[in-house]
Amino acid sequence: MKMKLTDLARGKTFHYAGFDWITLGAENGGTLVVMADILKLAPFDEDGSADWRVASSRKYLNGDFYEELKEADPDNGAAIMEATVNLTADDGTNRVTCTDRVFLLTAEQYRYNRDVLEPLSEWWWTLTRWSASYSYNVRGVNSDGALSYNYAYCSYYGLRPALLLASDLLISVDEPDENASAEDKLTPEEAGEIMRDMANTFGVPGSVTSDELAAGVAFLLGMLRGDVELRDREAPRE
C-alpha cells in the first residue's frame, strides 16, 4: 500500500530511488532519512581535509550520486530537499553551516538517533570534524556503534548518505495481513509434526497416490505462507 513518508514510524525502513533508507523523523521542514547500509568505502576527503565544504565525499555525493538518485526516481528527485547542514565541530568550534542535497549525519544527529540505528559491519563517517584546531580528524562510527575519530584520508570508512525528503513523499510499504495471527503461522516444528502425521496417515510411500501427495504438499505450502489457517489439527482420523 501507499503511505506518506511522514506517517512512517521513526526507525522504519523504506525503499526510495533504488536504495533502502531509515526514517529518523521530522527535521527542518522535511523528514530526515539515512541510508540503511553503507554506500561505499571512501575517504572523507582524499586530500585529508576535515572540512566538509571542500571534502571529496561531498563533491561525489552531491554530484554523481545525486544524479543517480534523480535518475532512479520517476519524479527526478523532486522530493530531495535542500538541507542546511551544521558543521560545528565536536568541541563546539567551527560554528558554520552549508547547504546540500546529500550529506552525512552529524555526530549529534547520530547520538540522538542511535536508539534506531543498529551497528553496521563497516565503519562509517559522520561529517563532524574533531575540532577547528585540527584540520584532518573527523568523527566516525565504529562497527560496534561507538563514536571514534580518524584521519580524513582513511579509505576504510564508509559513506552513509543522508537526505532531507519531503514529508508528503508517497512510499510503498507491505500491507499487513489483518486476518492472520501468530497462532495461524506454521513453525518449523509444526511442519515436522504435520509431515509425521501425513506419513502415519498414508502409510508406506507406495500407498500414496499422486493426487494425495499433491494435495498434502499444497496444504503444507499454504500454511507456510500463512494462506491456510491451522485448524482441526487434532481431529480424529477416520
Image (cartoon, helix red, strand yellow):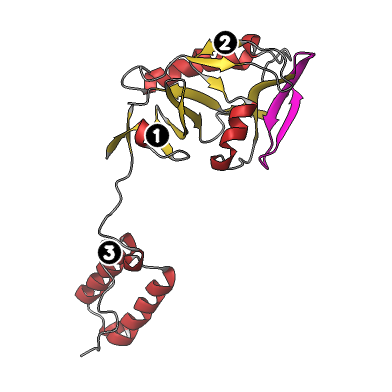
Q: Picture quarter containing residue 68?
A: top left
Q: Nearer the viewer, mark 3 or mark 1?
A: 1
Residue drawn at (38%, 18%) of the image: 77
Compared across the picture, whether 99 is left or right of 227 comes to: right
Q: Which mark is residue 98?
A: 2
Q: Which mark is residue 222?
A: 3
Compared across the picture, whether 56 is left or right of 232 comes to: right
Q: Position of residue 31 (x, y in %)?
A: 43, 27
Q: Picture quarter containing residue 184?
A: bottom left
Q: Is residue 192 magenta?
A: no
Residue of label 1: 15
- In contact (CB < 8 Å): disc 3 and disc 1: no
Numbered disc 3: secondary structure: helix
Q: Position of residue 160 (x, y in %)?
A: 57, 28
Q: Position of residue 29 (x, y in %)?
A: 42, 20
Amino acid beneath label 3: Gly
Numbered disc 1: secondary structure: strand
Q: Nearer the viewer, mark 2 or mark 3?
A: 2
Q: Residues within 10 Å of mark 3 (few under 14, many from 20)?
A: some
Q: Picture quarter containing residue 124?
A: top right
Q: Which residues are magenta?
A: 131-156
Q: Position of residue 12 (x, y in %)?
A: 44, 40
Of mark 3 and mark 1, the one earlier in the sequence is: 1
Give the spatial CA distance, label 3 vs label 1: 28 Å
- In contact (CB < 8 Å): disc 2 and disc 3: no
